[in-house]
Amino acid sequence: DDGISMIGEDFRKLTPAQLDEVLPRLQVLARSSPEDKHMLVQRLNGGLMPTTEEQWLEVHPGKDYATQKDKLLPGHMDEWALSRRGGVGEVVGVTGDGTNDGPALKAADVGLSMGISGTDVAKNASDIVIMDDNFSSIVKAVLWGRSVFDNIRKFLQFQLTVNVVALTITFLSAVCGYKPPLNAVMMLWVNLIMDTMGALALGTEPPTNDLLDRRPYKRDASLINRPMWRNILVQATYQLGLLIFLLKEAPVMFGCGDGTRHHFTIIFNAFVFCQVFNEFNAREIGDVFDPFKKLGTSPMFVVVIIFTIIAQWFIVEYGGDFTQTYPLTFEEWEITFMLGAMSIPVGYLMRLIPIDEDPESFAGIGDSMPKKKPTSSFGMLSLLIPLAAGLYQFYKEADGEGLI
């Protein structure tokens, strides 16, 4: 609402410091030359900014470097870096089709030229060529770029949770005098779930138009934001608590020997199902709880989940001496499945912890915080079903063992 417009003649009269004050609100630069466009890009991201006196004099022949270096656009690199936090500029995208647009396209972080009407100079200077000359293709490029960025974040959120739990339970079991509950082959399978399977499932999630409502991130924004750390720590705490509980109480609950192959297979199975259901949680990195949304548009995700469950069944039932697993009964499968499914209710509860993204991680001005959406009724149903079933199954098992 408080944006401003400016013509090229007034733009060229500004000093670098004056332009820095205008930039956050500048929306239209009319009657501007290609040189104005180039200087605007340079001032935003520092691209191709003069770094030496010789380079500055090439841009301003006949001018005095000592007295005018801070007075004439685009300025110089030392002055520009001091005016930015940590010397980091904005991420700039530029479109152009003419030969004179070449310098601005080259200075931009992402240069987009027109494939039909664009000149060869513009195409060579750009990073992306829009083959159909349709500006809507730029929106698609931005949408897919943001989708890839978010998918990387989803994968990291999932991967770090598995890493924290696997390393911690192995360390604690060694400190407490137990054999590691997850042997080398089990850890290899967990790594396959964590790396290959997780990347295929979460890295292929399709984009949604909601991504365009979010303001762009700054160049130095953290890849792991505050809500992601919350999600990682809460899920890791639940999984770690569950595995420690099974490490101590599973022999009594399931009637197996302490530290036997049967005992560790139960821990392994519960741990894998925790990862299976946490993959659904990892589909969102914010406060929205809708783990089963639009599964029909993510066929790779569904295939990976089904493959993981089938492969886990074969490993447990037929792995034998190779995987050092023990075949489980249907009831043991049911209980470990439900314990893993409890990651879904935990995913809902952890999102009730009020942690927002750092407003400083967003670029530009305006309402930087992503809009929060209400939890869907289907998401609430997915919370209540495993919670009720898990509590009932645990009560039945504990009552049969005389624990309550």
Image (cartoon, rainbow, N blue to C red):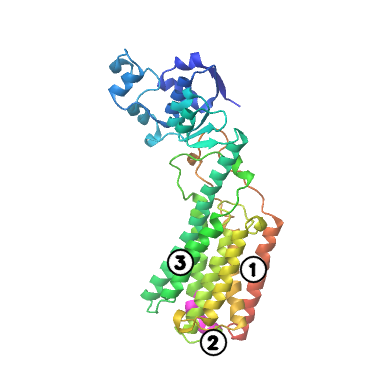
Name the residue beneath numbered marker 2. 255
Q: Earlier in the sequence, mark 1 or mark 2?
A: 2
Residue 404 in sight in this render? no
**Residue topped by disc 1:** 387
- Counting other residues with Cα less than 10 Å from the Cα at mark 1, is it few (<14), some (14-19), or many (20 or more)? many
Q: CA distance from mark 3 to mark 1?
A: 28 Å
What residue is pinned by disc 3? 191
The quarter holding residue 102 reads: top left
Q: Earlier in the sequence, mark 3 or mark 1?
A: 3
Residue 179, x across and y down, in percent: 39, 79
Q: Are marks 2 and 3 in contact (CB under 8 Å)?
A: no
- For residue 147: magenta? no
| Majority secondary structure of magenta residues | helix
For badge 2, the amino acid type reads Gly
Q: Mark 2: give few (<14), some (14-19) or many (20+) Cα within 10 Å.
A: few
| Neighbour tally class for label 3: few under 14, some 14-19, many 20 plus, Cα within 10 Å | some
Dot in front, 2 or 3 = 3
Across and down, in percent, residue 330 comes to 62, 82
Element type at marker 1?
helix
Q: Amino acid at mark 3?
A: Asn
State whether residue 255 is above or below residue 229.
below
Q: CA distance from mark 2 to mark 3?
A: 29 Å
Quadrant where the N terminus sits is top right
Q: Which portion, as a residue range, is magenta?
A: 245-253
Name the element at disc 2.
Answer: loop
